[in-house]
Amino acid sequence: MQNNVLILDFGSQYTQLIARRVRELNIFCEIKPYNRLPEDLSEYKAVILSGSPFSVRAEDAPHPDLSRIKGKVPLLAVCYGAQYLAHFFGGVVAPSNTREYGRARLSSIDTSDPFFKDIQEETQVWMSHSDTIQELPTGAVRLARTHDVLNAAYKIEGEQTYAIQFHPEVYHTTDGKQLLENFLVHIAGLEQTWTPDAFVEATVADLKEKIGKDKVILGLSGGVDSTVAAVLLHKAIGKQLHCIFVNNGLLRKNEFAEVLDQYEHMGLNVKGVDASARFLNALEGESDPEKKRKIIGGVFIDVFDDEAHKVEDAKWLGQGTIYPDVIESVSATGGPSATIKSHHNVGGLPDFMKLKVVEPLKMLFKDEVRRVGASMDLEPERLGRHPFPGPGLAIRILGDITREKVAILQEVDAIFINGLKEWGLYDQVWQAGAILLPVQSVGVMGDERTYEKCVALRAVESTDGMTADWVNLPYEFLQKTSNDIINKVPGVNRVVYDISSKPPATIEWE
């Protein structure tokens, strides 16, 4: 039996957050849809049932077969999971008189049970459900309640089965991490051995065995994911790795030369391909955002395929796929979860390339990718780089793309990003950039009226891009940045700052 945790996803918006909290305890876990239970459960030492937007009383409610789990493996049921155990195992679940949502405080806690080790009476928890458990399932005993919820936590006697009506994974549950540690470490007996160093060691060994003497082609983007994937592959197979970095003409100012130089100093076998004219010519006259993405994706595939054919006998395609991409590709219930899938990548490569795929990061979350990179001594500046969309500035230039517009936006963006770094604000921001708007506005420069372009600045804070809040940058910084842009970038006479959050807005404007 391995040191793994299985999380069964019922479509909750918080499922990925459960996994991240478990990983923070240095315990490896995997998310699987509730209706795709692994045939072999022997590698899992504990199971967690997620929440769900469904009611267990609904006819179409998720209904997994737990016969191989309940009573046989330590089981923690969260929210919907707790109601599921009650509803189908001898208890009663009914609509609550009021929707039980938001902060609550646990009381009547059974502190003698290891589940509540080091957790005090009146600890804050987060509720999010409209049904309530009126009667506990057969063999269950109550472990805690709140003012409004009689059965906030319970366990099944004679089993290592625990259930809670609240969400331990969210920030608002003060002792949520302690609760998860109590269940996984003190009850299930899991060892906290999932560390960046251990991941690197195991992954490099696996890559060596899987790839052998074959050649691997990897498309680098300059971003964190592809960079860490490249370094892992390089540690495993050295010069058998052939990296390709394509300039699509839509990168930030000087980015192609600077990133290529950084990669070469890292010892990677990198070829830079300047295909900017090819991309910009293909985009000429196109204003529709989706069509722009498809054009960029298509040209990228053509360019990459041309270069890949120059690497003789290549057998593998390396990709920087990370775990959220994997999870979202196998949604639990056809997509009821509130995760918001990014569509700003240029897409995968076609089947005709006939290469086997290797994805060394496919089980990692974004923050874990950065920790793995740090354990391999990658520079903090490289690991802290803001996300940048695959289509680049094409989706930050609203309307059609011209070389003049790209040049203007590159200058504006450089002033903004360099300013964030000079003021010590860059690392406080998750993602920042400038947007060139398809409007012109009246202005005055010297004694002359102007009718020139308007740009918007955007800076957000987030953990994974699914939700984001705008950053309250200092007025003094915004004032100086605006003055610098208007004075130094010909053709721009107005600067605005985007103060919308995601949702309802998106991070990018297209």
Image: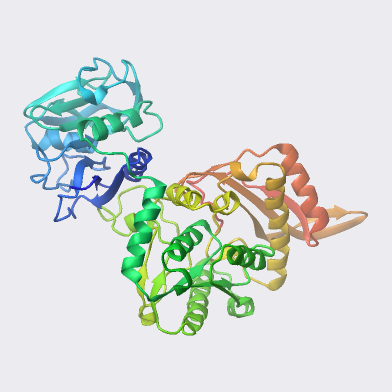
Q: Residue 76's x, y, as percent?
A: 21, 36
Q: Is residue 42 left or right of residue 195?
A: left
Q: Residue 263's x, y, as percent?
A: 58, 64
> Residue drawn at (15%, 31%), measured in percent from left and top?
93
Is 211 placed above or below 228 here?
below
Is residue 355 at least partly visible in the picture?
A: yes
Q: Nearer the viewer, residue 268 or 306?
A: 268
Is 233 placed above or below 103 here?
below
Which colouring convention does the figure follow?
rainbow
> Residue drawn at (28%, 49%), measured in percent from left and top?
30
Q: Is residue 318 left or right of residue 78?
A: right
> Residue drawn at (68%, 46%), measured in percent from left and top?
420
Q: Residue 268's x, y, as percent?
A: 54, 67
Q: Is residue 244 left or right of residue 490?
A: left
Is 360 placed above or below 374 here?
below
Q: How many marks?
A: 0
- Give the quadrant of the C terminus: bottom right
Q: Is residue 324 left or right of residue 139?
A: right
Q: Residue furthest right?
A: 447
Q: Residue 370's x, y, as percent?
A: 48, 50
Q: Nearer the viewer, residue 143 or 229?
A: 229
Is 59 placed above or below 301 here?
above
Is residue 152 at least partly visible in the picture?
A: no
